[in-house]
Amino acid sequence: MHRPAAPAAVRQGSLRELNLAVVLGRIAAAPRPPSRADVAAATGLTRATVSAVVDDLIAGRLVAEAEPAPRAGAGRPARGLVLAGDGPAGLGLEVNVDYLAVCVTDLAGRVRHHTVHRADLRPLPPADALARLVALADAARLDARRQGLTLAGAVLAVPGLVDAAGLVRLAPNLGWRDVPVPALLAAHPPLAEPVPGIPALVVENEANLAALGELHADPDGPVSFLHISGEVGIGAGIVLDGALFRGVRGFSGEIGHLTVRPAGRPCGCGGRGCLERYAGQEAVLAAAGLDRADLPADTAAARLADLAAAGHHATRAALAEAGAALGVAVAGVVNLLDLDTVVLGGGYARLTPWLRPPVLAEVSRRVLTAAWSPVTVRPSALGPEAAVVGAAGSVVRRIVAAPVGWLNRAG
Amino acid sequence: MHRPAAPAAVRQGSLRELNLAVVLGRIAAAPRPPSRADVAAATGLTRATVSAVVDDLIAGRLVAEAEPAPRAGAGRPARGLVLAGDGPAGLGLEVNVDYLAVCVTDLAGRVRHHTVHRADLRPLPPADALARLVALADAARLDARRQGLTLAGAVLAVPGLVDAAGLVRLAPNLGWRDVPVPALLAAHPPLAEPVPGIPALVVENEANLAALGELHADPDGPVSFLHISGEVGIGAGIVLDGALFRGVRGFSGEIGHLTVRPAGRPCGCGGRGCLERYAGQEAVLAAAGLDRADLPADTAAARLADLAAAGHHATRAALAEAGAALGVAVAGVVNLLDLDTVVLGGGYARLTPWLRPPVLAEVSRRVLTAAWSPVTVRPSALGPEAAVVGAAGSVVRRIVAAPVGWLNRAG
């Protein structure tokens, strides 16, 4: 008969893992730096256990003691516990149609490094675009190291459909099809230190990462919402009850290819009348009479916002038309999913003042429940940085959720 | 200090509840009638516990012993356990635009009574329509009683938006707005026997109930799918991972008001170009050159299917046009939710041979992932009866999930 090996030891190992995660999670979630006693009270663990676990977490550079706040009363102030600012960090990467971005966040989700490199990536072979991104990532790693941080995992955002193995099946606006990103990146030195339990590289749809970034940027925000990333392409992340809804095969959220004019303009996807052809960045620039080649290194969205704010008629008309098309798509989503919050992200964030009215007009005209179930349309808190910040943040959230891998590596 | 009353007894009560549910659930889920020993082996409970629980369930008319199957070998064959066919039953009710329906299912989900009464309900005040339904329900109760069944709860399907209190906020095709269904039904004798833990009446959107009916009609079917009920109105039930997705406020699935022609035909909802105006029953009949006043008591869908099968050109063209509009909406849903199965229900079920090709053509043209992620479009197993059967089934599934209420009532 088979006898399992040392079940008691296994159970002790699991218990340590659990306690580490519970204590670290409590410190991460507390509104103010908690004392060891606060953590014990909140978790139901004994003071002794909490102290031992906190010592482990401090030694592993996951937790630090905050400077004591000056106190008027008598007695030594308790030193609060905070997530370490010099421990593991997440590396967020993004390849988009007209820029590359790299971001490093520390355990608390603070952005410690952020670079955006503007360039039209469409003419480049994928391997070359990724090589440029690796160069930016190398600079980010050096900067992180100078700040005492260790990159513990990387997540790459791409504007397309990604399968579970990291193969980019299709990124229509970038012109990528069946690009084996992990294999191409394997030609370069690793982007991050190996940490047990943390994937060295995850490739994920940018709209999904942006929605996650937005979800975590506002802990008091709604738990179910539609996040729309409006860039050259338009993608959506659907957050239901605090979790990303990925669909049966991971390809959800392709709102840019929702049909808004069935016999309308042909789209690169093979369809006709897709939302992107009316509300994507290129369509809006064209309708506003702007040539993107004339634009400075600044983003197109910023230029459009400046012109609209200055009362430029063609730009306002172009945004009204884009907003109406976007509103048809949003009304469809609300009719279908009964969501009450729509977050305009990416380039749309700063265009919200001009997009919101036509979107709401279509929603109120086309949504069956609009009369008694209002829909909120608001700009994203993170804007165009949401995807790359969400990417980096997803690495550190993994570490906070299961810190034992990092500690085993560090120890 | 407050002292909780008899916590041990409470805990024993909970244990009995749990064991009753576990044993009954096992008997319900077993592919063949299991013996007491089979149930013990499958649940990890002792033979003695299983026997005591089974005795309780048999005394309460929830379980019966199947007739022993003839066996060639020696020894007395074990008698298998089955869900009782003479215990509690669910009452399903439906008010739709052009018919009323009533259905009784037993614990095993078998339909034991089913009446459909065809009539245009639009001219009737809601109270009168409900009074007619109650008369049908009375006849169903007598028939159920004659078969030894006790109605243990009722669920009413309506083609509209229902809030948590059973208020029908809006049923556009029926012309209902803010109809307090539970209050109107309270003027009649109760529809079902009172059973602890089982609501006497639930009012629910018919497309949601139809999707649930479909989910439970095929235990080996997909766990995530879109179920479209095509009648005068068009509604959808979205099933994700084996559960109905109701939306933030319970109003999900309004696919009939998805915009398929933004500047198209005005819709009763106040919008324009809604799917219903192109693929709803009335639109299809009109396009086929049929006057619904000429139709016999048979369903419009059956008539359309007969004509299409006979090669009637106008009908085929009407179904092709409806299918194309439906395909635009389905493509939107697939782009958004990445579902791989679409079930055509209600009147659409028998029209599937003519609707499927244009739906698939639009999906393959408009869905970004269509090339490598095929979508299956198939007719529902239950067809137009799905909502009322799903309604009745949802009552008995509640009893199977938590049988103690019924037993406490019966005992």
Image: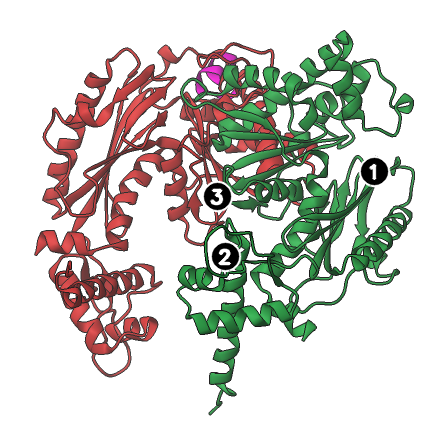
Chain colours: A green, B red
SS for callout 2: loop
Name the image quarter holding residue A160.
top right
Spot occupied by residue B164 in the image (x, y as percentages of width and height): 31, 33
Which residue is identified by label 1?
A99
- The main secondary structure of the magenta stretch is helix
Which residue is identified by label 3?
A241
Numbered-mark total: 3
Residue, x 49% and y 11% (percent of image)?
B289
Q: Earlier in the sequence, mark 1 or mark 2?
A: 2
- The correct choice, above or below, for B352 with respect to B129 in the image is below
Q: Read off the chain for label 3.
A: A
Residue, x 14% and y 61% (percent of image)?
B3
Q: Residue furthest bottom?
A: A1
Q: Residues within 10 Å of mark 3 (few under 14, many from 20)?
A: few
Q: Is residue B107 visible?
A: yes
- Do residues under tags 1 and 3 come within 8 Å of each other at their CB atoms? no
Circle 2: residue type? Pro
Spot occupied by residue B34 in the image (x, y as percentages of width and height): 29, 68
Which residue is identified by label 2?
A34
SS for callout 3: loop
CA distance separating discs 1 and 3: 32 Å
Q: Read off the chain for label 2.
A: A
CA distance separating discs 1 and 2: 41 Å
Give the side of residue A117 with respect to residue B398, left or right.
right
Spot occupied by residue A165 in the image (x, y as percentages of width and height): 71, 57
Q: Is residue A258 magenta?
A: no
Spot occupied by residue A147 in the image (x, y as percentages of width and height): 77, 57
Q: Earlier in the sequence, mark 1 or mark 3?
A: 1
Give the side of residue A146 with respect to residue B214, left or right.
right
Question: What's drawn in magenta, residue-wise?
Answer: B279-287
Circle 3: residue type? Asp
